[in-house]
Image (tube, coloured by chain):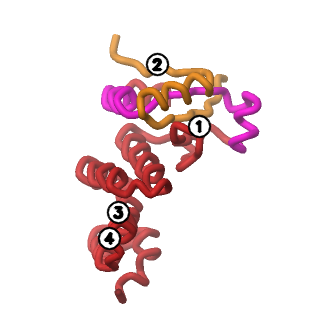
Amino acid sequence: MDAVTYPNDSVVEFIQKHMIPLRVAFDAKPLSIDFNVKWTPTLITLDADGKEHQRTVGFLPPEELIPSLMLGIAKSYFNRERFIEALSTLDKLLTDYPKSDSAPEAIYLRGVCRYKNTHDAKPLKEAYEQLQTKYPSSEWTKRAYPYRLL
Amino acid sequence: MGKMIIWETKMDVALARAKAENKHILLDFFNPG
């Protein structure tokens, strides 16, 4: 991460604009115990109350780290039922990083956000159809499979 | 020299900044070697 991802200008710019970067050693107590850290790098997205919303383990290149962080932020908004902000973040992720590993989950979560925001089931079916077309082998396409019947 | 990430090292400082700046926190557990 230090050699490739963190020095990347786009990564620096994204983190400066959207996040507070906090770095601690994997064995620093009590945080490593509190967050049950077993391997490095472990990257966790927290809200401003310190609540965890996403974690990844292992190296991520710049073109995967940024959408992964965007997904974590979107999940934070979703978990707090701030669906408009979640949707805005997910739309940005899918516009800027449609080929990233985070994109299929973003499509799934966008469908769920739109459903929760409107109580209209149509976005769930649309999410499945989009996933089936763009990412047919994704686990998120499988998870959305029941929505084809809506 | 290019731009670089300026990391916080204390959770309480990061939380205070996150609230004040309305941002999320990226918590990186790393191996200092």
Cα separation, mark 3 vs mark 2, equals 32 Å
Chain letter of mark 2 equals: B
Q: Which image quarter: residue A91?
A: bottom left
Q: Amino acid at mark 1?
A: Pro
The residue at which mark 1 appears reads as A41
The chain letter under disc 3 is A
At x 33%, y 28%, the residue is A13
**Nearest to viewer (mark 3 / mark 4):** 4
Tag on residue A118?
4
Upstream in the sequence, badge 4 or badge 1?
A: 1
**Residue ID for mark 3:** A110
Residue B32 position in % (x across, y down): 64, 23
Viewer-side label of 4, 1: 4
Residue B12 placed where, x, y %? 62, 25
Q: Amino acid at mark 2?
A: Ile
Callout 1: residue from which chain? A
Q: Secondary structure at mark 2?
A: loop
Callouts 1 and 2 in the same chain? no
Q: Position of residue A79 (x, y in %)?
A: 49, 56
Q: Is residue A11 magenta?
A: yes
Q: Tell me which numbered mark, 3 or 1, is placed earlier along the sequence.
A: 1
Q: Is residue A99 magenta?
A: no
Q: The disc numbered 4 marks a residue on which chain?
A: A
What residue sits right under mark 2 in the picture?
A: B6
Q: Is residue A4 visible?
A: no
Report, in whole angstroms, how far the alpha carbon at label 3 lies from the one at label 1. 28 Å
Q: Which quarter of the picture shows residue A44?
A: top right
- Chain painted red: A
Q: Is residue A109 left or right of residue A21?
A: left
Q: What's the magenta region?
A: A8-37
Labels 3 and 4: the sequence-earlier one: 3
